[in-house]
Amino acid sequence: GSAVGFGNVWRFPSLVFEYGGGAFFIPYLLALFLVGIPLLVLEISLGQHFQLGDVGCFGKIHERLRGVGLASIACGYMLVTYYSMLLAWTFNAFFASFRADNFWDQDEVSGTEAKEYFYQNIIGMNTLGDDLMP
């Protein structure tokens, strides 16, 4: 889930439809069943076998592999901080769509106006200074 960018949530389905995207699912399913699920089972079984966290599991395999456990924790932390911001933007846009002064109720909304609305009202770039610092 982390490999797909946030913008692809809306763009990807339209591109799949436009270019006949059934062929995409063949390598996706191959990667899922040949790499993704076996790695998931491996991770779960390592945790069950050693009864430890990431650093401890890899440290039991070999002392120098403790860094792999630390790296997975660091990557998880960075991912959570990134996606929490994206979820906040999504919830903000979702609840803003139910307000009485809904931006999308206007008759003709251009792409430039929609982009400005997103930058200024949804993600709050109007709160930043000229140097893009809060």
Image (cartoon, helix red, strand yellow):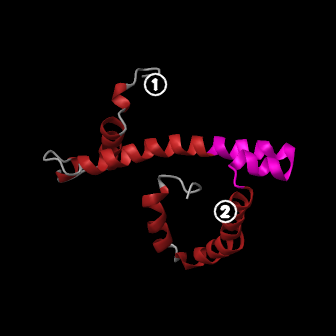
Q: Where is residue 31 in the image (x, y as percent from the top left)?
A: 68, 70
Q: Nearer the viewer, residue 45 or 3?
A: 45
Q: Position of residue 126 (x, y in %)?
A: 34, 28
- For the stretch drawn in magenta, the main secondary structure is helix
Q: Is residue 12 left or right of residue 104?
A: right
Write down the residue under mark 2: 44
Secondary structure under the numbered disc 1 in the rendered image: loop
Q: Where is residue 107 in the image (x, y as percent from the top left)?
A: 17, 53
Q: Across the whole image, how many numbered discs are drawn on residues? A: 2
Q: Nearer the viewer, residue 52 or 91?
A: 52
Write down the residue under mark 1: 132
Q: In this view, does 28 lie to the left or right of 105?
A: right
| Residue drawn at x 29%, y 51% as measured from the top left | 94
Determine which quarter of the picture holds residue 129.
top left
Let me know if residue 64 is in the magenta part.
yes
Secondary structure under the numbered disc 2 in the rendered image: helix
Determine which quarter of the picture holds residue 41.
bottom right
- Numbered range of the magenta stretch: 51-75
- Which class describes the residues within 10 Å of circle 1: few (<14), some (14-19), or many (20+)? few
Q: Which residue is most to the left?
A: 100
| Residue 111: mark | none
Q: Give the position of the C terminus as an image quadrant.
A: top left
